[in-house]
Amino acid sequence: MNKKIVSLIGIVFLVGACAGLLMGKTILDSKPESNVTEKANVSKLKKENEALQKEVRKADESVKELPKQSYSNEEMKGLDARATDFIKAYFNTKSNETDKAMEAAGKFMTEKGKQTILPFAKSSSEEMVVTVSPYLSNNFVRFDSVVGTAEVMSFSIIKSQVNQDQPLSAKYLLRLSLEKNETEWLVDDLTIVTINQDLPSTYYP
């Protein structure tokens, strides 16, 4: 009886040892497969990272290629041109035909500007007609692209002639306040001051 028990115990130990060996082999065999999978994942991530870095470098290079202050320069040129267009339309007038000038200048004004900006040298007299025309404008621009507002200080020489008399010239400081709608800058307000000084070469710092 004791021999049988001993034999059974031996068999149990033998079976356990064999099972342990098999499990160990399975684990060892699975490790290389796991390592291969991990290496593949790491390699894939590296490739994706390299691709992203290339895209970032391309984006940086494209930004570096843009001229400095290109946006500001274009905006300032546009404001300068708009101020000049408005001044030409507004001051090209006769004292008895200011409605025509206001209609032409109205294309460059906001709705508020159309209501508040008054005609220049308006008169109903047909005996004394003043003909006005802009001779020279030197514009200085300052704008805030975030808020969408701008200011143009224009030092201008305006010629005027009464009937057939000799034309006279006067110097003016024109302060134009502009606002930007979806597509363009429009004059929102105008202040006109007579000056005696020479036209400056700079205004804003």
Image (cartoon, rainbow, N blue to C red):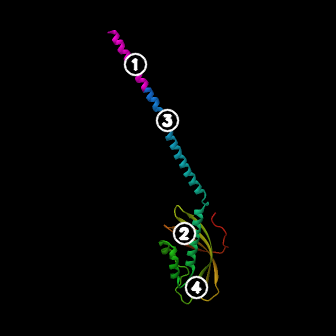
In contact (CB < 8 Å): disc 4 and disc 3 = no
- Of circles 2 and 1, the one toward us is 1
How would you rate the neighbour count of disc 1 (Cα within 10 Å): few for under 14, some for 14-19, many for 20 or more? few
Residue 88 vs residue 51, the one in the foreground: 51
Figure quadrant of residue 62: bottom right
Q: Which residue is mark 3?
A: 35
- The residue under label 2 is which amino acid type? Ser
Q: N-terminal of the two: label 4 or label 3?
A: 3
Q: Secondary structure at mark 3?
A: helix
Q: Which residue is mark 2?
A: 177
* Residue positioned 36% across, 13% down in the render: 7
Q: N-terminal of the two: label 3 or label 2?
A: 3
Residue 63 vs residue 76, the one in the foreground: 63
Rendered view: 142 above or below 130 = above
In contact (CB < 8 Å): disc 3 and disc 1 = no
Q: CA distance from mark 3 to mark 2?
A: 70 Å
Q: Which residue is mark 1?
A: 14
- The residue under label 4 is which amino acid type? Val
138 displayed left or right of 22: right
65 displayed left or right of 112: right
The quadrant the C terminus occupies is bottom right
Q: CA distance from mark 4 to mark 3?
A: 95 Å
Q: Which residue is mark 4?
A: 130
- Residue 122 in percent (x, y) is at 53, 82
